[in-house]
Amino acid sequence: MMKAMRLSTSTSIMDRYQRVQNVVTMEECIQRCYDAGYRVLDMNFCDMSNPGMPLALDNWQEWAEKTADQAAKLGMEFSQSHSHFYHFLNPNVENREFHDEMIRRSCIASGILGVKWMTVHASNDAVTRGYSHAAAKAGNLAYFPPYFELAFKHNVGVVIENMFDPTPVQRTYTANYEDLIDLVDTFNDPRIQVCWDFGHANLVGYDQCEALKVVGKRLKSTHIADNHGVKDEHLLPFYGDIDWGSIMKTLKEIGYEGDFTYEITPWLDRVPPQIRDTALRHSVEVGEYLLKLAE
């Protein structure tokens, strides 16, 4: 019998520190997500690794352990996480040591939280226009193994996310799902699979249902967000133009057994944290409706 999808959300639904500096703590984020009806979470280490944020502080392991304890007491689970990321193939990148350390900490903290799948971004070999498939692939194959092995040591699997082209003249490695599949298959390890970002796929413009059928059993986690096909808006489903009915049927058809995880990061950015609870409950209602379409 196929395992049923569970509704989940990235912690960025409440803790968007880049916009709401220290207004919503992680502790409050977890509690308010629980109160709204969430029982599964995706830890967003992208925001948590900004300078001054918990993952970037000296007591980061203590913070991760405290966060894990809080979730456990509530009966909540961190099934996914999103690693810190940067364009590591850019030869001119600044603060490389800091970024590498944040990825290292993401691997370890994911283990502390009990995460099953940690999302990473592949990097381009080119900074501006175009890219060499061969160079990009080789660069990613060379960079990632030490971090992947660290994640495995902490019982965390890794999923590589599909990306998108930010402008019509700038190509991004793994925006094409064939590139993504090729990279994953070249690693040839069942602990390295695919995270599908539906918003990114909508921006690229190909048939998501057909793409998902090709990805197939490689799909282990999701980033659920809507947009209007122009920019990466990270909207709640039905607030953009993605055909969610067809997508839910396809997820059922391919036997997807991972979680249905929102990454609606800026959706509530302009909503004062004090009045976000109604919107959180609404997001749960939308998610529960969508999950029924896949039954």
Image (cartoon, rainbow, N blue to C red):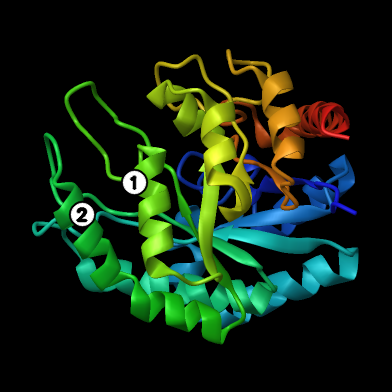
Q: Is residue 289 left or right of residue 161?
A: right
Q: Is residue 263 left or right of residue 185?
A: right
Q: Are marks 1 and 2 in contact (CB under 8 Å)?
A: yes
What label does residue 136 carry, if any?
A: 2
Name the one closer to the observer, 124 or 44. Answer: 124
In percent of width and height, residue 218 lies at 57, 54
As helix, strand or loop, the secondary structure at mark 1 comes to helix
At label 2, the amino acid type is: Ala
Give the quarter of the image for residue 147.
Answer: bottom left
In percent of width and height, residue 99 lies at 31, 66
**Mark 1 → mark 2, Cα distance in angstroms:** 10 Å
Q: Is disc 1 surrounded by few (<14), some (14 to 19) or many (20+) residues within 10 Å?
A: some
Q: Is residue 32 left or right of residue 194?
A: right
What label does residue 179 carry, if any?
A: 1
Front tag of 1 and 2: 1
Which residue lies at the image location 45% right of the left edge and 16% below the top edge? 229
In percent of width and height, residue 282 lies at 81, 26
Residue 17 seen in render: yes
At label 1, the amino acid type is: Asp
Tell me which label, 1 or 2, sits earlier in the chain.
Answer: 2
Q: Is disc 2 surrounded by few (<14), some (14 to 19) or many (20+) residues within 10 Å?
A: many
Q: Is residue 2 above or below residue 165?
A: below
Which residue lies at the image location 42% right of the left edge and 60% below the top edge? 185
What label does residue 187 carry, if any?
A: none
Which residue lies at the image location 35% right of the left edge and 76% below the top edge? 145
In percent of width and height, residue 209 lies at 59, 28
Name the one closer to the observer, 102 or 278. Answer: 102
**Split into 4 quadrants, where in the image is the C terminus?**
top right
